[in-house]
Image (cartoon, grey):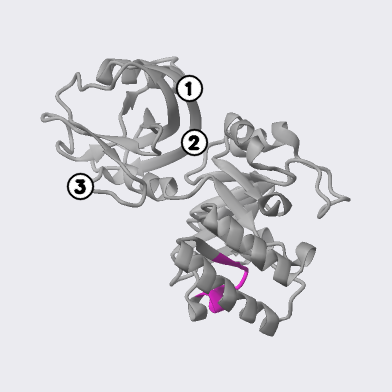
Amino acid sequence: MAEARSVVHVAAGILIDAEGRFLLASRPAGKAYAGYWEFPGGKLEAGESGHAALVRELHEEMGIIVTDATPWVVQTFTYPHATVRLQFFLVTGWQGEPHPREGQSFDWQTPGALTRSPILPANGPILRGLALPPQLALSNVAGLGEAEWLARLDVALAGGLRMLVLREPQLNAAHYTALVTQVLVRAQAAGCRVLLHDAIELARDLGADGVHLSACTAAQLQRRPDGLHWLGVSAHNREELTTAQRLAADYATVGHVLPTTSHPDQPPLGWAGFAEAVGAGWPFPIYAIGGLTNHDMARARQHGGYGVAQLSGAWH
């Protein structure tokens, strides 16, 4: 019987500057995968927390003092020489200017426009997550009427909206298809991704960017649907987040966090419940949803989220 391989625990930092760029570091000569690019960090020492290891490693590697870092995603990857569990942190505050102390090189990169390769395999999925915007909008034709919502969509697109879930369960198939066609023309011209809600075949047929699945639909699938670039999943607890992980989702939403008019009879998770659900560490970004606005972005990140998903709040 093969001997079980121990897991190496690593903390890694994603430094994000004022322009939204992130920092990559090259692995120096003498290390495994020398010359590959990765997010800086290192192994946890005995009894050390992930955050403490991050602060220590980034000071040792690049001479900075971390002042603001929040947990993001957890990625487990098996290399030929080791299995590593990487806890990634979003680092948005530090003192000092990063400079190489261990023979590596640094380079600032723009999400979705990578210019460095090869990337260390365990870091590849993280780059996909960084291409997601912190705000996810859900459509609200039901609340505003189609003409008014489309007008507000145009305003939001002009203001920089980059990801939209088209969820209108009250519409019949023909009306929903017609709405999708209109929205795709507007959104794609503005560089906004459009995901259809639970409409896998329609997304393929009309060239949408992907789908967002309800927890019920996701639970019925055995694997990630083919032919879709982006996949999101709604979740309310760890069990449903496990389903999202099994389907290799690109992100999940968890909620509802605060009371909402759309779920008047269901008690909200609250921020403590949200933190409990996401705290186990998942390999994809998680959006808080339910009664939130952009003003809740910082609180979502403090509780382990990447950003906020909004229905009513997105269209004010």
Observer-nearest of 144 and 21: 144
Q: Name the one closer to the observer, 215 or 108.
A: 108
Q: Residues within 10 Å of mark 3 (few under 14, many from 20)?
A: few
Residue 293 belongs to magenta span? no
Say if 132 sits above or below 190 in the image. above
* Residue 239 can be seen, yes or no: no
Q: Residue at x 74, y 76 (%)?
A: 171
Quarter of the image containing the N terminus? top left
In the rendered view, tell whether residue 153 sits above or below residue 90.
Answer: below
Q: Nearer the viewer, residue 291 or 305?
A: 291
The region drawn magenta spans 195-203
**Where residue 68 is drawn, which disc sits there?**
1
Label 2 residue SS = strand
Question: Horizontally, is 182 left or right of 173 in the view?
Answer: left
Disc 3 element: loop
Nearer to us of marks 2 and 1 is: 1
Residue 222 x %, y %: 54, 66
Residue located beneath label 2 in the image: 72
Q: Residue at x 35, y 35 (%)?
A: 84
- Residue 303 lies left or right of residue 75; in this view the side is right
Q: CA distance from mark 1 to mark 3?
A: 29 Å
Q: Amino acid at mark 1?
A: Asp
Judge left or right: residue 248 versus residue 179: left
* 3 and 2 marks in contact (CB < 8 Å): no
Q: Is residue 191 visible?
A: yes
**Mark-to-mark CA distance, 2 and 1:** 13 Å
Mark identifier at residue 118:
3
Q: Residue at x 66, y 60 (%)?
A: 152
